[in-house]
Amino acid sequence: MGLIKGISIILVDKIQHGVDDFNSPIFEDKEIIVKNVLVVPASTDDISNSLNLTGKKAEYTLGIPKGDENVWENKEVIFFGKRWRTIGIPQQGVESMIPLNWYKKVMVERYE
C-alpha cells in the first residue's frame, strides 16, 4: 500500500496594485504555489448540495495541508492545466486532532 500524496497547485491571489484615474482599485494576480494538496472528484452528494445551496456545480474537492495560512474563500486555483474557482467557505478541522496531513477542504468549480 502506498502513501497518500498530494500535488502542487497554484492559488491565484489578487493584490491591489494602485488606483486608476477614476479612483477604482487596480488588482494584479499573484500566483502562490501550494504543495501537497489532495485533489478528489466531488461526490454525488457534494455536487447536488453545492447546486442547491449556491447554484454552482462542484467538480473537485481540495484537501489543504496542515500549516497552510492562505485564504481560500472565493479564489482561483490552477491545476490539471485548467482554472477553477473555490466555492464557499472552506471546512476546517482542529489541526492537532486530525491524524493525516490535511485539515481543511474546499470545493471548486470549473472557471473559464
Image (cartoon, helix red, strand yellow):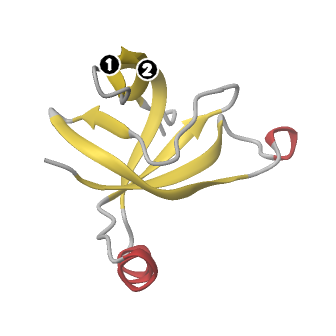
Pointer 1: what residue?
28
Q: Quadrant of residue 91?
A: bottom right
> Residue 64 location in percent, x, y?
56, 38
Q: Is residue 9 visible?
A: no
> Residue 62 location in percent, x, y?
45, 47
Q: Residues within 10 Å of mark 1 (few under 14, many from 20)?
A: few
The vertical placement of 68 against 56, above or below, is above
The amino acid on which the numbered mark 2 sits, given as a three-letter code, is Gln
Q: Residue at x 29, y 20 (%)?
A: 20
Q: Residue at x 63, y 46 (%)?
A: 104
Q: Residue at x 33, y 77 (%)?
A: 55
Pointer 2: what residue?
16
Q: Secondary structure at mark 2?
A: strand
Q: Residues within 10 Å of mark 2 (few under 14, many from 20)?
A: few
The amino acid on which the numbered mark 1 sits, given as a three-letter code, is Glu
> Residue 76 location in percent, x, y?
34, 39
Question: CB atoms at circles 1 and 2 under 8 Å apart?
Answer: yes
The vertical placement of 96 against 44, above or below, is above
> Residue 1 location in percent, x, y?
48, 40
Left or right, residue 2 beside residue 98: left
Q: Residue at x 43, y 20 (%)?
A: 16
The residue closer to the viewer here, 106 or 72, is 72
Left or right, residue 71 beside residue 16: right
Query: Sequence-wise, which precedes: disc 1 or disc 2?
Result: 2
